[in-house]
Image: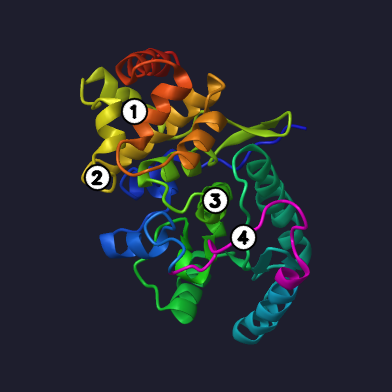
Amino acid sequence: MLYKVAKCILLASLICGGYACAAVGQGSDATVAMHPSLAPCSQGGTCAKAPSAAGFPSAELQRQCSKEASALRGRLGGSFAIVEHAPFIVAGDMPADKVDDYIKRDIVGPADMMWQTYFDARPNAPITVLLLSTDKAYHEWARKLFGDTDLPYYGYYKSAARTLVMNMSTGEAVVTHELTHALMDPDFPQVPLWFAEAVASLHEQFTVRDGQMIAEANFRLPPLQDALRQGKLRPLKDMITKNDFYGMSRGLNYAHARYFAMYLQKQGWLADYYKYFRDNYNGPGSDVKALEHVTGKRIDQVDAEFVAWVKTLN
């Protein structure tokens, strides 16, 4: 089976400063509030004793979903279709059959593939997905439910509430980006920001092949190749070790991280790298050690081969 996630258009990325599909806030405070890699477990509550695939979802998790879905109906009113598919509660201000389509295509299918490929631990609490059909509805409900006003263009994952808030008028690609954050949260709560965004961005556009999400080129490629041509792309080691991912060059950082993850995937290393990195994480520097262990090469050699590969893409 082959299908493609809806494309993020380049125009939108330019409007939002080159990182629109990254779904990060315009300000640093919004960014911290909306990403599980910066606000894991202690706020979201999804990491404690996260279950494995066996017996998932549990009867207790299904009960929690039913309880939270009932409460959500009271808050949203009758204009929303609300569907329970544990661990997900999906609510959309659109016909129920359209919500069902989104669940199959952009939530349940990708979640199953990510669990099979990367994540061992699974959520032990419901994850809510709000699908808002217009930009107006997106802003209104984000404000009503959470008091959020400084919103990313496409949508965001609010880890403390275990909720994806999606502006569906912009397309579907952001759903799988933010879904990746929600599912990685219980599996790798200490994940460094660059790698969390690398894998999430990888899932913005993909083809399904042999039960896996295979990344395809997207709007992030031109700025990455432009930086290479201009000699402005910093070494890979700097990108993954310096604590400045959301700094002045965050648009380029997203592109750099996404295509490095795509390179690892093309080489057959990404899933092994994710699992080794997660299982052997012990603070700063773990990412470099894990990379050199999995590839059998020094990071500067990996970087050189990655750069040569990027230049071949179109």
Q: Which residue in the structure is indicated by mark 4?
A: 123
Nearer to me, 186 or 230: 186
Mark 2 crowdedness (10 Å alpha carbons): few <14, some 14-19, many ≥20: few
Measured from the top left, where is residue 77 in percent x and y? 65, 84
When the figure is inspected, residue 191 is found, relative to residue 46, above or below; the finding is above
Tag 3 or tag 4, which sits nearer the N-term? 4
Q: Answer with mark 3 or mark 2, whichever residue precedes in sequence.
A: 3
Circle 4: residue type: Pro
> Predominant secondary structure in magenta?
loop
What is the number of the mark on residue 243? 2
**Left or right position of 54 against 27:** right
CA distance for labels 4 and 3: 8 Å
Q: CA distance from mark 1 to mark 3?
A: 30 Å
Q: Position of residue 11 (x, y in %)?
A: 41, 42
Q: Pointer 3: what residue?
A: 187
Q: Nearer the viewer, mark 1 or mark 3?
A: 3
The location of residue 102, given as percent across then percent down, is: 69, 55
Q: State if disc 2 and disc 3 touch (CB < 8 Å).
A: no
Element marked by disc 4? loop
CB atoms at circles 2 and 1 under 8 Å apart?
Answer: no
Of labels 4 and 1, earlier in sequence is 4
The residues colored magenta run: 43-62
When asked about the image quadrant of residue 151, the answer is bottom left
- In the image, residue 82 sits, relative to residue 55, either above or below, namely below
- The circle on residue 224 is 1
Q: Residues within 10 Å of mark 3 (few under 14, many from 20)?
A: many
- Label 2, label 4: how many angstroms apart (C-alpha)? 28 Å
